[in-house]
Image (cartoon, helix red, strand yellow):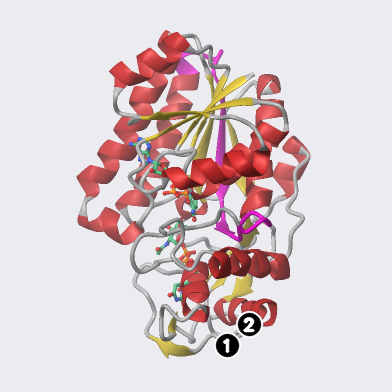
Amino acid sequence: MNILVTGGAGYIGSHTVILLLQAGYRVIVYDNFCNASKESISRVKKIAGKEIITVEGDIRDKVQLRRLFSSHKIDAVIHFAGLKAVGESVEEPLRYYDNNVCGTVALCEVMAEHQCKSIIFSSSATVYGDPHTTPITEDFPTSATNPYGRSKLFIEEILRDLYVSDNTWKIVLLRYFNPVGAHPSGLIGEDPNGIPNNLMPFITQTAVGQRSCLSVFGDDYDTPDGTGVRDYIHVMDLANGHVKALVKLPEFNKVMTINLGTGTGYSVLDMVKAFEKASGREVPYCIAPRRAGDIAQCYADPGYAKEILGWEAGKGIDEMCADSWRWQEKNPNGYRK
Ligand code: NAD
Ligand code: UD1
């Protein structure tokens, strides 16, 4: 089977491509490299020992997508391509809506033209807004506080409308919690541009000496130690969830909305301690004010993923930290030489 992976050079995409190749799928990566390096593709090939067709292109470019679908028979699409920085989305909402929403519409139009109607979409736990309680099940109310989150909600709704109009589509919306970690080889991992927004890359860059100190955003939340609690999930577990979803896709008779999380919440300070243990490095930190838009705690009820996909996360916090550290230590400048 030929799988088109949009955004396949990025963090989650590159890890998923390895598992797809190992499961025997042929993979075509389609990426405009706006937030990725071609080096990630070379390393994925090295890890998997298999070839990948890579096409540099934008999901909004229907001419190029048509050329791609005409020259390859594509059986399903795993759609990671998108912009993901919350703060940037507040500054540049139109760019986010154009890239994420218009890009997905263009992609689906070309898929339909070529009778390719199977898609797995990268949604996010951000669609739960500030949940009234935890753990979070898929039927919780949704909301968004920024354009990034709203783009995910819009795309979910667009894909549901698409299914209503033509129920031969097979659609899975995967709502990821907080992906961390890296491939155990240390060859690929998360490589953010500039100062990281997310906790784990900030911790690893502090441990390697690129940042002097981690700011812990708030220690007065209603959580066991006062710092924010999240459901961190190893990126290899997350990648595996996509392979499981792909296998089950033909059986689905409705749009499937599925949480991918571990079901366990860890605080910022839990993560710092676990990372220090895994790396043997100290992570200096100071308590800073709360970050606007942050919530106290967020973790999944992963029961539906287990029931429907037969999937559950297997890697714990120590492995997440050890693998994040291996990647950072071997590649202090990410994919840059
Ligand atoms: P990433 O930025 O590493 O990967 C996204 C990839 O898409 C990049 O390689 C980028 O170059 C590409 N891309 C962006 N716009 C494109 C376009 N118009 N055309 C072609 N390629 C384009 O991000 P990631 O962490 O791997 O996230 C993958 C997906 O998962 C995104 O849709 C993101 O919103 C979603 N998601 C991520 C997280 C997270 O914490 N990493 C959490 C929830 C959901
Ligand atoms: C953030 C985004 C969310 C997105 C997700 C994955 C916001 C408000 N939310 O989620 O929309 O889906 O990333 O990309 O940006 N923290 C610190 N110091 C830091 C960084 C983070 O204390 O330098 C804390 C945060 O306050 C939070 C936890 O660490 O409690 C996790 O933060 P982060 O990794 O940014 O993820 P989320 O905020 O959950």
Relative vertical location of residue 202 with respect to residue 145 in this rendering, above or below: below
Which is nearer the N-term, disc 2 or disc 1? 2
Image quadrant of ligand 1 equals top left
Q: Nearer the viewer, residue 175 or 18?
A: 18
Say which mark, if any, is on residue 276.
Answer: 2
Is the C-beta separation of discs 2 and 1 under 8 Å?
Answer: yes
Q: Does residue 181 show up magenta in the picture?
A: yes
For the record, the magenta segment spans 164-186
Q: Does residue 137 show up magenta in the picture?
A: no
Quadrant of the image for the C terminus? bottom left
Residue type beneath disc 2: Glu
Q: Which residue is mark 1?
A: 282
**Residue 294 location, quadrant:** bottom left
Q: Which residue is depicted at the point 57% across and 87% down? A: 282
Q: Position of residue 302 (x, y in %)?
A: 69, 51
Q: Position of residue 273 (x, y in %)?
A: 64, 83
Asked whether the viewer can see residue 322, the reply is yes
